[in-house]
Image (tube, helix red, strand yellow):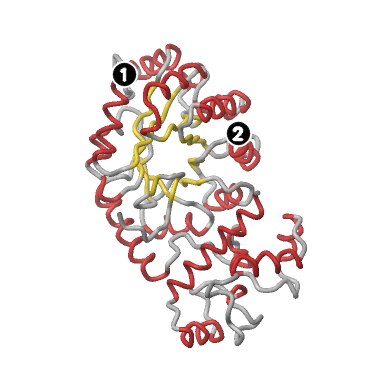
Amino acid sequence: MDNIYDLWIGERQVSIPVAIASMAGVTDGAYIRDRAAHVGIGFIGGYAIDEATISAARELSHQGREEFLPRDPIAEISAQIELVAAAGVIPGINIRASEVDSLVTLSKNIGDRALYEIDAHCRQQAMIDAGCGEFLLTHPQKLLSYVQALKITGVTVSVKIRAGVAPNDAELAKLLWKAGADIIHVDLMDFGPAKIREIRNVCPVFLIANNGVTDFEKAKDYFAHGADMVSLARRSDEKTLSGISQALAQFTREHGWYNSPKQLCRGGDIRSLAFCCMPVKPCPLLPALEKLKISPQEFVAMKMEGVKDTILEAGTSTCFGSLAYCCKDTTPCMFRDSTLKQSGIKRSIYMQQKRDLARKIMNKIFS
């Protein structure tokens, strides 16, 4: 498997940071299989798995909506997972549940063969009335209990949310992370990439950005604000997916870090601390550190510890005597570039090292 993205969910390596989001009655195993060359995760479903949600799905079906209504949900979901996995894609199950026991029963029958995505996203009134979908965003304690119950069974948990429904999306994301959620899959609605940055800045959870991804430039904007992956639903046709995945691979081979953030002074998320100068002059770094309760001295120590025994430790001819304080490769800088050239370091390798530094900084901040 090509490892240019160095992207993992637990012990699962993600081949491409592009996912197919669930669409009720549409995204089954065959749908994912036919697009497998261009995606790393395929979320099948949503599947209603208990009496209340199955009844709601049946009601929606009678209203003309496409829904999955298998006679045996566990057997059907298991078969669909096998189809996705056989295509070389990580399977995810988008689950509509009205009570925690149904989730636990499903996980005990299916095991850890797939990612379990709790549907806190559906806005159909029948599902909300069943205690599913957006209902969970306004009743967070129930949602958190779902996450905790699934994590106890030893599976990987994703939560699909719709931005702007909960009173505070960032606070909800923080609670989900602390409850054990591995992934937060965000339908951004009309909020755009700033909402992804808002969530990225409060928790280190794996983030999937959804809504409006139609080409590589849109995907890149989400990546630059903190997304680990992007997902497509209605636009998940082979032509669109192929265009995004090919452009993404080309960009990554050239620049090394596929989702490198904007610099902090240009609206970057918390990962952009890897690009910041020493905190010696008034700039956005100082208030950012104050918000994080990190002193300038601690920041310098954190950076130098993060680059110890790496190629970023050197750089006597740079502004602050180390590549640790240099900006991203797309920002013109003759001092950085001459140091890289003299050391025989490719820009893509430099950016990969910056990615690793950002991860170390994130680990320090959120530990």
Q: Residue furthest front?
A: 309
Q: Residue 28, percent across and down?
A: 28, 32
Looking at numbered disc 2 in the image, what kind of residue is underneath it?
Answer: Ala
Tag 2: Cα neighbours inside 10 Å, few (<14), some, or many (≥20)? some
Q: Quadrant of residue 303?
A: bottom right
Q: Residue 236, percent across and down?
A: 31, 44
- Residue 74 lies left or right of residue 342; in this view the side is left
Tag 1: Cα neighbours inside 10 Å, few (<14), some, or many (≥20)? some
Q: Residue at x 40, y 32 (%)?
A: 112
Q: Residue at x 58, y 77 (%)?
A: 323
**Which residue does the numbered mark 1 point to in the structure image?**
69
* Disc 1 from disc 2: Cα separation: 31 Å
Q: Looking at the image, which is closer to me, 140 or 23?
A: 140
Compared to residue 265, the image places residue 134 above or below, namely: above
**Which residue does the numbered mark 2 point to in the structure image?**
179
Compared to residue 91, the image places residue 294 above or below, namely: below
